[in-house]
Image (cartoon, rainbow, N blue to C red):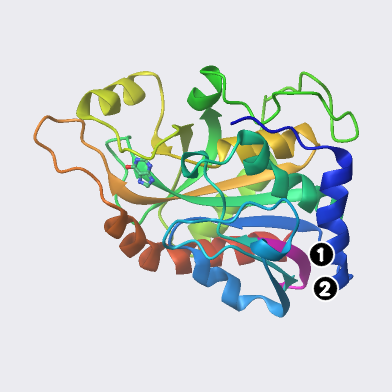
Amino acid sequence: MEEFFTMHEFNEAVTTIRRFTDLKPRVGMILGSGLNALAESIEDAVSISFADIPHFPVSTVEGHSGRLILGTLEGVPLVVMQGRAHYYEGYSMGRVGLPIRVMRLLGAELLVVTNAAGGLNMTYRTGEVMIIRDHINLIGMAGLNPLRGPNLAEFGPRFPGMNEAYDPALRRLAQEIALEAAIPAHQGVYICLAGPSFETPADVRFLRLIGADAVGMSTVPEVITARHSGMRVLGLSGISNTLLGEEGAPPPNHEEVLEAGRVLTPRLETMIRGVLRRL
Ligand code: HPA
């Protein structure tokens, strides 16, 4: 299914959100699988169900709440997606990217995106953080790009560049904060697959071979949409499981992804709070 949204439709979502609050967020944030608890720290929070916002995708995955929260964290006004939409749920790429454009229209200039990811790099351990240095848009190379369709020049150019998609200054800042808080944090390459099936051992070896350090089923469409409209991006992956790529290795499962979230949530919260404090 393919869908291309118009400026009018983006504005309908914005108008609805504006009926709940006039807060102008500086930062947009997406909380991934198992990381929803972070939203509970937000002060003066106004919470809106995705179902109440025109055109918003309604998430169907366990561990994803599907609420938009506007409030402040470390004194920074922000808009937070508690839960996100994934392509594998059946949404068009256009709808997966829609909330990012709505956050941009609300005023967000910076996107902090989190996810749970499988570790491909042999030095990564469950519970560690990967600051995303770059991504491989494998899902997009096969044609699934959120920017496919008429270009909306109000947001950005037809052919947006993707160099330094993950802001170097924000990555440095996140690395500094991790160091100070003794949080094990790597910088690496995230690769996005469509899912929902996990990788075969041969897939894992292939992904490692082409230069990916962690694999997941999200983030890249949202980052492309954010970069198209000029937002700076910080991406943080929580390594929820490690992938060996050996025949006979046990497959990852969604429960271990959620379980690792309990270790990762406070770590990511520390890093995000630190970054916000020093913006
Ligand atoms: N593979 C794909 N996506 C994931 C994984 C994984 O091992 N862990 C968390 N998201």
Amino acid type, label 1: Ile
Q: Residue 131: image x %, image y %?
A: 52, 45
Real-space Cα distance between discs 2 and 1? 5 Å
**Looking at the image, which residue is at 91% across and 34% down?**
154
* Quadrant in which residue 206 is drawn: top left
Residue that carries the numbered disc 2 in the rendered image: 20
Q: Does the magenta segment cover residue 202?
A: no
Q: Residue 7: image x %, image y %?
A: 87, 40
Asked if 242 appears above or below 2 in the picture, the reply is below
Q: Residues within 10 Å of mark 2 (few under 14, many from 20)?
A: few
Residue that carries the numbered disc 1 in the rendered image: 17
Dot 1: what SS?
Answer: helix
Task: Say if residue 166 shows up in the picture.
Answer: no
Q: Residue 216: image x %, image y %?
A: 43, 40
Circle 2/circle 1 CB separation < 8 Å = yes
Drawn side of residue 164 relative to residue 123, left or right: right
Q: Residue furthest left?
A: 248
